[in-house]
Amino acid sequence: MMNKNQTHRTRPWPGFPTSAKALGTNFGDANCMEQLLVHCAHAIETNDATLAQQILWVLNNIAPQDGDSNQRLTCAFLRALIARAASIGSCKLLAAMANSQANFTIHTHKFSVIELASFIDLTPWHRFGFTAANAAILEAVEGYSVIHIVDLSLTHCMQIPTLVDAIAGRQEGNVSPPLLKLTVAGSTEDVPPMLDLSYEELGSKLVNFARSRNIILEFRVIPSSYTDGFANLIQQLRVQNLVYAESGEALVVNCHMMLHYIPEETLTLPSINSNPNLSSCGSSSSYGYDVASSSSTSASSSLRTMFLKALRGLDPTVVVLVDEDADLTSNNLVCRLRSAFNYLWIPYDTVDTFLPRGSKQRQWYEADMCWKIENVIAYEGFQRVERVEPKCRWVQRMRNANFRSVSFGEDAVLEVKAMLDEHAAGWGLKREEEDVVLTWKGHNVVFATAWMPA
C-alpha cells in the first residue's frame, strides 16, 4: 500500500502513540479530538496518506460509535473524513476501508407523517422556530380574509397544523375564518428528514386536518428546487401576484431551515448555457433571475441574494426566516471542520436528554446528523448542500434586499418560553435586538427573525 520511504518517514508529531494501550486519557477530551480531526483533514488535503492513516487509527480507537456524546460526534467526523479521502482517491487503503466496513454506511430513515411529527416534538430544535414564526405570522395577518402561506420548510409542513390550530382558536362569534392557501416547493432532493409519501398525499392530509378545525385550506405544489434558488416557485408566485394583487390577500413566506441549501457566494455559479438545469428554463427572465447579467464571483450574483431580492419584489406581508446559527460555508476544509465540530456537538449533547440509547428514534436522529456532517466534510461543489450561514449574515442579506426587521412581541416570547419549559433545563431563549435565539447551555443554536418590506 505504501513504499518503504513513506513507512519510515519522521512524523511531525513527537511521541505519536503506536498502540491502543499507549493512548492516554488526554485523547478523550473534545479539544484533543478536534485537534486530531484537524490534523487528519490537513493530512488528507496535502495527500499525506501515512499521517492520515495514523491519525485515523487513533480516532478509530478513541471514538466508538456507541460511546459518549463527544466520541459519537468524533466518530461521525471520522466517517466523513474517510469518505472524503476515498472520494478524492488520496489513499487506496482508506477507499478500501470505506467500502469494506458496513458501520460507515449512513442509513437515513423515511418517516411517516405521524413519525415525523412525533420526532420533531422531542426537541426544541424545530419547535422553537415553529412557535416563534407562528406568533409573528398571526400578528401580521390579523384582519385578512385570505392568507397565502408559502412554506419553504425542511420539516415538510409539520409547522402548519399548529398554525391552523392557532388561526381556528382566534375565531370569535359568527366571524368566518380566513381562507388559507398553502403553497410548497416540491422537489426530489433527498435531504433529511425524508418523508415516505408524496407532497400530494401530504396535502390531502393537511386539507382534511384543516377541515376538522373548520378552516378551508387550498394546497398547491409547485415543482421547484433550492439548487436554482427556487426560480420556478418565484416565477409562479409573480404570475399569481398579478392575478390577486387587488384582492387584499396576505402573502406569508415561511422559511424554516431551507434557505441555507440555496447556493451562496462560495459556490461559483455556472452560466445558464453551461448548466442544463438552468438552460432548460429558457431565457434569464423565464428562469426567474437575471443571472446572465451578473458576475458569478460577486456577492450580488449569488442565488441567495437574487432569491431574496425576487422575494422582495413580491411585496410579501411578512417573511419569517428561521435557521441554524453557524457558519459552514468556508471553502477551506479545516476551517469548515472546526466550525462544524464546534456547532454540531450540540445535537449529540442534547440527545441524551430526550432519547434512550438503543432506541430507533435515536438511531434515526444520529443518522441524520451523520448525513449532515458527511455532506459538510466529504463533498465539494454542488454536492455540498449544507451551507449554513450565521444570523448576522442573513440579517445583512435581508437588509440589502430592502426588508426591515420586525420585533417579536412579548406574547411570542412567552409562548416560546412556555414551549421550552416542556424540555430539558439546558435549553434557553435570548433576545438579540428584534430577533430571538434558541440556546443550549448558553450557546446559540437556532435563530428566528421576522421581516416586512422596507
Image (cartoon, helix red, strand yellow):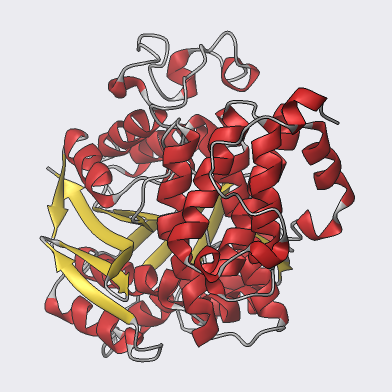
Instruction: Name the one closer to the observer, 292 or 31.
Output: 31
**Above/below status of 64 relative to 244:** below
Q: Residue at x 70, y 35 (%)?
A: 50
Q: Residue furthest right?
A: 100
Residue 355 location (% of width, % of height): 59, 85
Q: Residue at x 58, y 81 (%)?
A: 118
Instruction: Name the one closer to the observer, 83 or 253.
Output: 83
**Above/below status of 247 relative to 349:** above
Numbered circles on residues, count: 0
Horizontal side of 281 relative to 286 (left or right) equals right
- Quadrant of the image containing the C terminus: top left
Residue 71 location (% of width, % of height): 59, 68
Horizontal side of 269 relative to 254 (left or right) equals right
Residue 153 seen in the figure: no
- Quadrant of the image containing the N terminus: top right
Residue 439 seen in the figure: yes
Instruction: Choose top left, top right, bottom left or bottom right for residue 207.
Output: bottom right
Residue 404 location (% of width, % of height): 13, 47
**Above/below status of 375 relative to 75:** above
Instruction: Name the one closer to the observer, 14 or 454.
Output: 14
**Above/below status of 423 relative to 388:** below
Q: Residue at x 27, y 51 (%)?
A: 391
Instruction: Choose top left, top right, bottom left or bottom right for residue 403.
Output: top left
Q: Residue at x 37, y 26 (%)?
A: 302
Residue 362 location (% of width, % of height): 65, 77
